Image (cartoon, coloured by chain):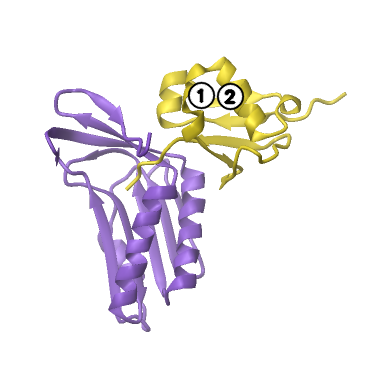
Amino acid sequence: MVASPPVTVRLFSVLKDRTGMAVIELESGGVPTVAAALTVLGERYPVIAEYRRWIRPAINLSYADEASPLSPGDELALITPVSGG
Amino acid sequence: MVQGTAMERRGDGTWLLVTPGPLDVGAIEASLRDPLAGGICVFVGTTRQVTGSKVTEELRYEAFSEMALAEMGRLAREAQERWPVLRSALHHRTGTVAVEEASVAVGVSTPHRSEAFEACRFLIDRLKEVVPVWKKEVFADGRTEWVQPGR
């Protein structure tokens, strides 16, 4: 059986600083939705659980929400409150 | 082009840029000139030294560049739908931005001035809400802090 490509999770700003990770790969079979991915990530990195209510997820460069489905090969970005400008 | 720069120039007169290099406000203003324009409005956001009792040494910006470009492009299109925007530019700097230097510049040209002010205001206000860029304050006393509105 050929393994499905993983879901690639990207972290920035405070989440990158506090996890020490910029990219995390998740086996796509275990994370059918953004919510499932956030739960898996939150168990591994408590700061992600702590920030969950403020995270705006984005899939493949577009904002999504916790109910959005994830497909193999998707890129999931965890966008904490932005402060550009 | 400075390494680490993400840029897009669209056929509809939109110029998007995320760059670690300094912003060129003169080049932005020049890019907005158009024979049908009666006005150009450019907003330039700069690093402020004093906020209340805090003294800022510099700001450090991090961007999710590919998505920042995509979001800025969506905002430009939204502005075109709401106002008669002829040309627009949205530029954001990344990395360290010293006091007085520009971190962001957005501009539009339109046939008349009121719509130029309105569209420009819309672009900078929405940019600060949705474009995935984060700033870290570096204070004069050496402390640092990510700015996280609403957190």
Residue B93, placed above or below residue B14: above
Q: Which mark is residue A48?
A: 1
Q: Chain of mark 1?
A: A
The quarter of the picture where residue A8 lies is top right
Q: Is residue A30 visible?
A: yes
The picture places residue A66, in percent across and down from the top left corner, at 61, 37
What residue lies at 73% left-to-right and 34% top-to-bottom? A72
Q: Which disc is residue A24 wearing? A: 2
* In the image, residue A52 above or below residue B115: above
Identify residue type, mark 1: Ile
Question: For the residue labelled by badge 2, is the local secondary structure a helix, a strand or a loop?
Answer: strand
User: Which dot, 1 or 2, sits closer to the camera?
Assistant: 1
Based on the displayed image, in which of its 4 quarters is residue B76 positioned? bottom left
Q: Residue at x 36, y 83 (%)?
A: B35
Which chain, by letter, is purple? B
* Chain where mark 2 sits: A
Q: Nearer the viewer, residue A27 or B130?
A: B130
Q: Please state if B30 lies on the left or on the right of B4 as rendered.
A: left
The image quadrant where one finds the C terminus of chain B is top left
Specify the label residue A66 is tagged with. Answer: none
Q: Is residue B107 visible?
A: no
Instruction: Tell me how far mark 1 sits from mark 2, CA to CA.
Output: 12 Å
Q: Position of residue B16 (x, y in %)?
A: 43, 57
**In x, y percent, where is residue A53?**
50, 32
Determine the image quadrant of residue B126.
bottom left
In the image: residue A10, left or right of residue A40 = left
